[in-house]
Image (cartoon, grey):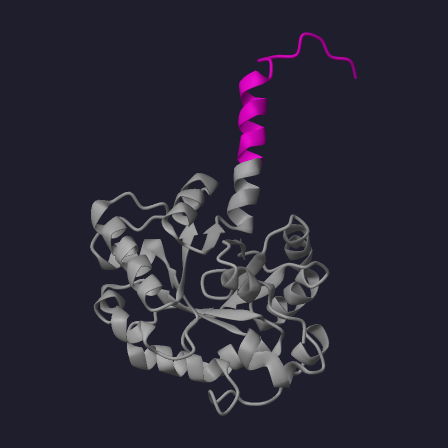
């Protein structure tokens, strides 16, 4: 099996720079992958992709050394197992609010005796290697999202669950759950305190911590704090931002009327 490059980065205490794919298209995924992200996450929760789109996007990502990940829509064992069978190196699962959620999630990610994942790695055998079944338990990255007040209250118990290798903060939902404004790049003291607590607790339990960011500047600050997995924006936001920048420049600098015209 091709080793998971993200696990290697984590063992070396190096930060993973993760890209986000909301657009359900293999070509846009391929373009993103060729920019050099450490990993790319196909978002099946709030993105526009379904299973069929996700498989073609994994195929496009695999033309590079970028690691394919996915965020599943919910804690549902069937889709978690299916995305791993499709060749995801890791799964981000939303709304892990208590230890029993984390246990269900981990069980779906690992083959027996560590978990209860059903056997049938239909695409992973080709994309990740014929010996995939013998090594998958060592190479798969289950990533539990911590994004609610309930999860904060149960954080110690969640972090104790065997097999959870990373927790990932959704700052918008976390802020919303705490009665604050839902946004990336949180500066609200109450949300920042919660973020810092998650990071501190994760470090205590030897679990990696990640966070979603809106800008590179904020992501770099989070790496300095100790986060080892940072997402910046998404393909749709990056495309919209670049297009807006071009048009803003054009509208600002274009003459009000052509000095001359010939047809």
Return the residue nearer the eye: 2 or 24: 2
| Residue at the spot 59% in from the left edge and 60% down from the top edge | 24
3 shown above or below 183: below
Q: Is residue 205 magenta?
A: no
Magenta span covers which residues?
A: 243-263
Instruction: Estimate the x, y position of residue 35 in percent, counting from the top left.
Output: 65, 48
Q: Residue furthest top?
A: 259
- Based on the displayed image, in which of its 4 quarters is residue 5 positioned? bottom right
Where does the image place residue 205, in percent across and percent down from the top left? 33, 69
- Is 242 drawn above or below residue 2 in the view shown? above
| Number of on-image labels | 0
Q: Is residue 121 visible?
A: no
| Residue 201, quarter of picture | bottom left
The residue at the far right in this view is: 263
Q: Please state which of residues 91 and 165 is positioned toward the viewer in this rendering.
A: 165
Residue furthest out toward the bottom: 113
Q: Residue sitting at 54 percent across and 66 percent down? A: 7
Name the residue at 65% across, 81% down. 132
Note whether residue 224 is visible.
yes
- Location of the N terminus by quadrant is bottom right
Is residue 244 highlighted in magenta?
yes
Query: Where is the C terminus found, in terms of image quarters?
Result: top right
Q: Find the residue positioned furthest to the front.
A: 12
Residue drawn at point x = 48 percent, y = 57 percent: 13
Query: Residue 207 at what x, y percent from top left?
Result: 39, 67
Q: Looking at the image, which is closer to me, 20 or 166? A: 166
* Residue 164 picture quarter: bottom left
Left or right, 50 with respect to 2, comes to left
């Amino acid at each position: 099996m091709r080793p998971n490059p993200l696990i290697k980065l984590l063992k070396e205490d190096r930060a993973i720079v993760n890209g986000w794919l909301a657009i359900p298209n293999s070509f846009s995924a391929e373009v993103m992958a060729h920019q050099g992200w450490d990993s790319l996450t196909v978002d099946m929760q709030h993105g526009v992709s379904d299973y069929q789109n996700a498989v073609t996007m994994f195929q496009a990502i695999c033309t590079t050394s970028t690691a394919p990940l996915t965020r599943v829509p919910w804690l549902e064992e069937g889709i978690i197992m299916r995305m791993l069978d499709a060749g995801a190196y890791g799964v981000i699962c939303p709304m892990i609010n208590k230890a029993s959620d984390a246990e269900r999630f981990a069980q779906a990610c690992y083959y027996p005796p560590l978990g209860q994942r059903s056997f049938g790695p239909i695409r992973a055998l080709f994309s990740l290697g014929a010996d995939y079944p013998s090594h998958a338990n060592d190479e798969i990255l289950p990533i539990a999202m911590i994004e609610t007040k309930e999860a904060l209250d149960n954080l110690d118990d969640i972090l104790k669950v065997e097999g959870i290798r990373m927790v990932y903060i959704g700052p918008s939902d976390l802020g919303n759950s705490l009665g604050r404004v839902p946004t990336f790049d949180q500066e609200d003291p109450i949300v920042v305190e919660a973020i810092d607590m998650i990071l501190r607790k994760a470090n205590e339990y030897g679990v990696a911590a990640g966070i979603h960011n809106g800008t590179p500047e904020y992501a770099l600050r989070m790496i300095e704090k100790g986060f080892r997995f940072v997402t910046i924006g998404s393909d749709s936001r990056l495309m919209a931002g670049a297009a807006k920048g071009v048009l803003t420049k054009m509208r600002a600098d274009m003459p009000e009327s052509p000095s001359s015209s010939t047809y």
